[in-house]
Image (cartoon, helix red, strand yellow):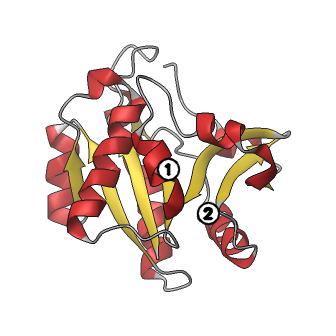
Amino acid sequence: MIHVIYLAAGYSVRFGANKLLYPISGKPMYLHLLDRIVRLRDGGKVSFDITVVTQYAEIAEEMEKRGIDCAVNPDPSRGISSSIRTGIEFLMERDGIRPGDRLLFANADQPYLQEETLLLFMREAERRNAELACVSFGGEMYSPCIFSGSYVPELLALKGDTGGKRILRRYPGRVLLFEISEEEQVADIDAL
């Protein structure tokens, strides 16, 4: 089983405003990639569930309207590790996480990541039975990233503003790098 954990809880310090709610082409930034993920799930080409992690009432209310699971990060000031922990703990309470499950972490500030890229990434990780995987551009690791359920203890041990790439760097020989040709798809939006 694949569990998509959609991280939408950041403070947007460098952006100067709540970038997740900032409109791009008429809708909030966080909805661009989320809508693609939902279309991918609903299209039946790959099976997964979605959990959105946020601190924002506006996002939580929208998820309730859409029927998408939402976990509220109680202390996002502790950095991205607290959002990772919130998402994992939500899944553990809801269904449990088995070692053979996969966790795909996607960031809400990547509005240009395409549905086809996600589909091909997920299929390649499945085909190669990758326990660790991430999208890459120019050999550099970017989100989204996949972790097999056996890495849950290490993900839960992350502290501060440290994400899963710390774990990927610890095991470079185990990581499937899914190289893409368009840098814009992996760029996160950090400035107005």
Q: Quick check: can you spot residue 107?
A: no
Q: Position of residue 55 (x, y in %)?
A: 22, 36
Q: Residue at x 25, y 56 (%)?
A: 90
Q: Residue 153: x, y in percent? A: 44, 48
Q: Which mark is residue 144?
A: none
In the depicted structure, whether residue 132 falls above or below residue 47:
above
Q: Residue furthest bottom?
A: 44
185, above or below 22, in the image? below
Crowding around mark 1 (Cα neighbors within 10 Å: few <14, some 14 to 19, many 20+) is: many
State the residue position of label 2. 118
**Residue sitting at x 49%, y 68%:** 99
Q: Which amino acid, mark 2?
A: Leu
Coordinates of residue 137 in the picture (x, y in percent): 79, 42
Q: Quadrant of residue 12?
A: top left
Q: Is residue 91 left or right of residue 180?
A: left
Q: Which residue in the protein does label 1 denote?
A: 106
At label 2, counting other C-alpha atoms closer than 10 Å, the crowd grade (few under 14, some 14-19, many 20 or more) is: some
Q: Position of residue 73 (x, y in %)?
A: 23, 38
| CB contact under 8 Å: marks 1 and 2 | yes
